[in-house]
Structures are given as structure tokens and as C-alpha cells.
Amino acid sequence: MTVSQILLFFVKLLAGTGVFLVGVHLLTGNIEQLATGRLKALFGGTADKRLVNVGIGAAATALIQSSGVTTVLIVGFVNVGVINLYQATAMIMGANIGTTITAQIAALSAFPFTTYIQLLVFVGIMLSMIAKKDGLRKMGMILAGLGLVFIGLSLMSDVMKANRDAVQSLFTVVKSPLLLLLAGVFLTALVQSSSATTSIIIAMSVAGLTIGSGGNEVLYIILGTNIGSCVTALMSSATAGANARRTSLIHLMFNTLGSAIFFVILLFWPGFMSATFRQWFPAPATQIAMFHTFFNMTCTLLFLPFCQWFVRTSKLLIREKQPVAAETYLDERMLSSASLAITQLKKEMIRLSDTAMDAFRTGYHAFETRDKSLIGPTQQLIDQAGVISQSMVNFLIRLSAQSKLADERPISDLHSNLGDIMRIAEIADNFTKYTQKASDKGLEFSENVTKELRGMVELLEELYSLTKQAVLEEDPSLLPRIDQVEETVDQLRKELIDHHIKRLDQGACKPESSGVFINMVSNLERLGDHLTYIAQTVR
């Protein structure tokens, strides 16, 4: 081959690979968006049973067609404390099984009927252009992505067929198992997709090309792709907490140990491929895809009983002086799935509202006991709420930039809820001012006033408990009770002010206390209003 022919070969090969990767990207992105509800339900079904978690990892990866995305999400969940290392280990094993689906799809390119599947590009694009519903447009892009996958595979296979003799002579020379393994690791790490590397190998087999002598050599590359697939998760966890880094290390240990075991087996059994998959399946592409599935399923069955060993080893290698609980439910890895990101945002919102309510409780207690020393702690809680709120706003802005139309409503609701929660923090700040004023001017309130105020605060505590439950459980059936309690708070405000006016007329209360009392009762009513506004977003 001349220099120009070699250059043209690589241009066409890279073009085919690019088309394939675009197809996979369209599949992954649009399936994930259509399956966000299912994905949320899957990860919400975490349990301590290993097989359940393996199923969750496999199903999630099969849904979104990317073990890289699934593993990054798992790392993110561990980082924020949603799942533990034992659950993550089993999920990663399942994700390795789920990712073999892409290779199975690629293996279909060996059959003539897949030529007609390429028409899905036209069908899918037309559907996405004329459909009015977002779901149908996403379905159109999925069909187009599937068609592009087969067009990419066809381009790669055709360019290899056109240069079959030159390419075959090159790959016949490479027989070193270790070199082939490292090639698989390098190529996968480079494109950050084991599916892409495996599909290139499958395209070669469709073109009639063999690696080495045509024995086990091709399998060494497949083993290398499994190790290389760990790079995405390792990069994702580099700046995360210790448990997130441990999760990535477990992924690397699992894939490396499994590949090492099969590497030794293949070395000592040179006729493995000929005695097994070549006998069972006629098409070379199917043989490779089936080995990929067999390898990952076997490793999962082999290592699943030793999840605790992987966890202990990761803790031994990555130490943490003082285990710290997650300070936030937000993790940028969640941005790849709007549904999961919104779920985490709701949990973070509850953390923010807990902080704001703690500020209110501390501020109210400071007023009730005239304890000015509690003003400082109240302000610290208000400042903490401000920091959490700002981080949520930044996260929401990033999520909004890449979300679909269906996600705009919950994102808008979260923005609105943030404003209501920060108004609660402002009310807490107002109470510190009432405490300061009452203490400086020696304002006194009767026992009846204190009792009435405490009753109103108790109603607000009930209202917050109901609001929190409604948001976390997404339960609109609680709204009638929430409205009822809020109406009681409003009525109680009127009664307290009426009682105060009567006490003023009777001389039981001093006029100088009126400003503080009326403002304070109005603030309590406003707090109830803001809690109700938050609950109403559950509709």
C-alpha cells in the first residue's frame, strides 16, 4: 500500500468509527431520556440482596446502552451516600453484563438483512421532524441512532474488505497475547468505549479478517477492552470522596482480575475458541459477541460471593482518616440523567429546608427565652442555608442547559421552592431582631401570649412535617390536610391579633410591645404560606 492508500484507509476507517459512535450516542442519550422514569425506579429499588443489585446494574445499562454512564452514576450515588460500597460492587458487575448488549447488536451486521436496518436513519429522522410529541421525536432519534450504528459498522467492514490483504498481513504478524491485551486496553481507554473497540473487531470479522493465527488472539483484545472500560469511572471519581474512588477501584479490580484469569486459561488452552464458540456459532461476529457476554457473566457468577473482599481491599488501599457523611446530595455525575438529578435535588431541597427550619426553631427559642446567645447560632444556620441554596441554583442552571422539555416543570418548581425556603430563613433572621429588640427594651409578654404563640408554632411544625412527607413521597393526597392546617394557622393569626387588641384595651399588654407581637405573628403566618407553596408543587 502506498502512503496515500494508507492515509485513505485510515480516513475511511475513522469515518466509519465516527458514524458508529454518533449512532451509539444518539441511542444512549435518547433512550436514557425516554427511560428516566424506569431508570429512577431501578436505582430506587436498591437493596442489600446481591442478585437484585446485579439485575439493577444490568437493566440500567441495557436501558441506556452504556456501561460508562451507568458506572459513573453508581460512583455518583456512592459519593453522596445513596448506596453503599457493597451495593455498588454488585451493580458494577451487572453493568458489565448489560454492556454486552451493544456487541450483540453489532454482531447482527454479519447477516444480510441488517442492510435494510440502515433505512431506519431516514425513518427516524423523518419521525423526529414531523412528530409533535417529545416522546415520538426521541423515538425517531433512537431509530436513527440504530441505523447509524449499522451504517458505521458497514463502512468499517467495507474499508477492511477493500484492503483485506494488507490489513490481514498486518494483523497476522501480531500474535503476542500480552500485546493484544494491551492494545485492547489502549484503544478502549482512548475512545472511552469498550463497545466501540469490540464493534471494530466485529467489523473486521465480518470483512473476513482474522487476528494472529485465527485462534484465541481476538479474545485477548476483548479482555483488554474490559480493563480499558474502567478509565471513564476512574476519571470521574478522581476528585470525589474516598468511597467514590473506592467504587472505581472495585470496578478496575473486578475487570482486571477477571481478564487475568481468562488470560491464563486462554494461554494454557490454545484451542479454546475452536473447541467452543467456533463450534457453537457459525458467524465469527456472533462468536466474538457471545464470548464477550460469556466472559462477563462468568466473572459475575465467580466474584459475586466475594463482594465483601472487594470492598475490604478497596478500603485498605484507599484509606480515610475520618469517615465523613455526605455533605450534599448533589453530584455532577447525576447531570447525565435529568430524572435522577431532580430526585437528588429534591433530597437536597429537604436538607436545605431542614436547615432553614432549624434556624427558625433556634431563633424562636431565642425569643421565647430572651437568650441573646442563640442569635449567633441562628445566623450560622441562616448562612449555611444560603450556601446550600447557591449550590442548588448553580446545579439547576447546569441541569436546565441540557434538560428536555418534560423536565422544565420540575426544574421550575425547584427554583420556586428555593425562594420559599430562603424566605423561611429570612423569617428566622427576623426573630433574632425581635429577640434583640425585646431584650434591649425590656419588653414582656404574658404567659397567655407565650402559650398562644407556642400553639401556632406547633401547628407550623405539623405543617412542615406534612410538606416534607408530600415532597419526598410525591404524594398529592396529603394536600387537603396541608391546606386545612394552613387555614388553621391563618385563622389563629387573626385570633391572636384580636386577643392582643383586647389585652391592650384592658391594659394587660403594653403598647410598645404591639409592633413586635403583630410582626411576629404575621411572620409565622407567612412561614405557613411558604410551606404550603412548596407542598403545592407536588400536584
Image (cartoon, helix red, strand yellow):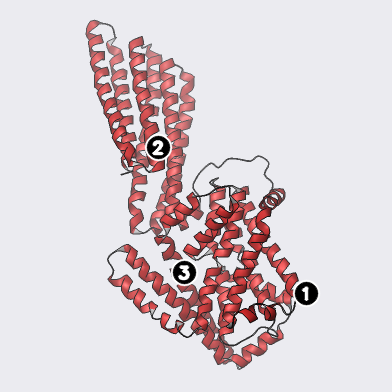
Residue tagged 2:
469
Mark 3, secondary structure of its residue = helix
Identify the residue shown where x is 33% and y is 49%: 412
User: Where 92 falls versus 432 (above or below)?
Assistant: below
Residue type, label 2? Gln
From the viewer's perspective, is 476 left or right of 386?
A: left
- State if disc 2 and disc 3 touch (CB < 8 Å): no
Q: Residues within 10 Å of mark 3 (few under 14, many from 20)?
A: some
Residue type, label 3? His
Residue tagged 1:
268
| Image position, residue 314 (x, y; %) | 68, 51
Mark 1, secondary structure of its residue = helix
Q: Nearer the viewer, mark 3 or mark 1?
A: 1
| Image position, residue 325 (x, y; %) | 58, 40
Q: CA distance from mark 3 to mark 1?
A: 39 Å
Q: Residues within 10 Å of mark 2 (few under 14, many from 20)?
A: some
From the viewer's perspective, is 432 left or right of 95?
A: left
Q: Earlier in the sequence, mark 1 or mark 2?
A: 1
Q: Which residue is at the far right?
A: 268
Identify the residue shown where x is 69% and y is 46%: 319
Residue type, label 1? Phe
- State if disc 2 and disc 1 touch (CB < 8 Å): no
Q: CA distance from mark 1 to mark 2?
A: 60 Å
Q: Label for residue 25? A: 3
Image quadrant containing the C terminus: top left
